[in-house]
Amino acid sequence: MFQYTDDGSGVKRAIITVYFLSEEGEWLPLDMQIDTAADVSVIPYDFAMKLQLIGEQTPIYIREVVGSMSGLKTAVKAKVLNKVIELPVIASAFVTESLLGMAGFIENFIVSFYPNGFEVKPI
């Protein structure tokens, strides 16, 4: 079972490390908040640069409940708990924290939330 992370504001967040495959064949770690309300995952633009993803994506404008943002949409190989998946992501210069959305993730994992922690299990 994973423990929630407290960001100092008293809000508990479900954070898990996801590894992304770079163009050079290296797995790079990124801590991501599991966001069951997000359709697609969002990563910071500078992390996408490290993966050398820039140039392979489609520009996209996202309208959210609390606002909107723009970014570049692509798909990348990601590894969660040693299971490799194809994960659609949006790289945005407007975010500093990474969100692990449902597309590509929920089809491959069962996530259970409890008062004192959360579990992520491969399907």
Image: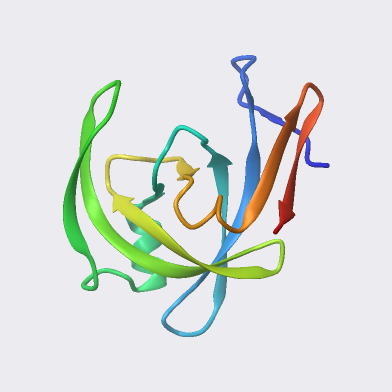
Residue depicted at 55% across the width and 55% down the height: 107
Q: Is residue 13 above or below residue 11?
A: below
How is the structure coloured here?
rainbow
Residue depicted at 27% across the width and 58% down the height: 73
Q: Is residue 62 above or below residue 77?
A: above
Q: Nearer the viewer, residue 73 or 45?
A: 73
Which x, y percent locates residue 29? 58, 61
Q: Is residue 64 above or below residue 106?
A: above
Q: Is residue 44 above or below residue 14?
A: below
Which x, y percent locates residue 121? 74, 52
Q: In which quadrant of the rendered image does the N terminus lie?
A: top right
Q: Nearer the viewer, residue 75 or 70?
A: 75
Q: In which quadrant of the rendered image does the C terminus lie?
A: bottom right
Q: Residue furthest bottom?
A: 24
Which x, y percent locates residue 66? 29, 21
Residue depicted at 66% across the width and 68% down the height: 83
Q: Residue furthest top?
A: 10
Labels in figure, total:
0
Q: Is residue 62 left or right of residue 35?
A: left
Residue depicted at 63% across the width and 40% down the height: 15
Which x, y percent locates residue 74? 31, 64
Q: Is residue 1 left or right of residue 93?
A: right
Quarter-wise, where is residue 89 in the image? bottom left
Q: Is residue 76 left or right of residue 15?
A: left
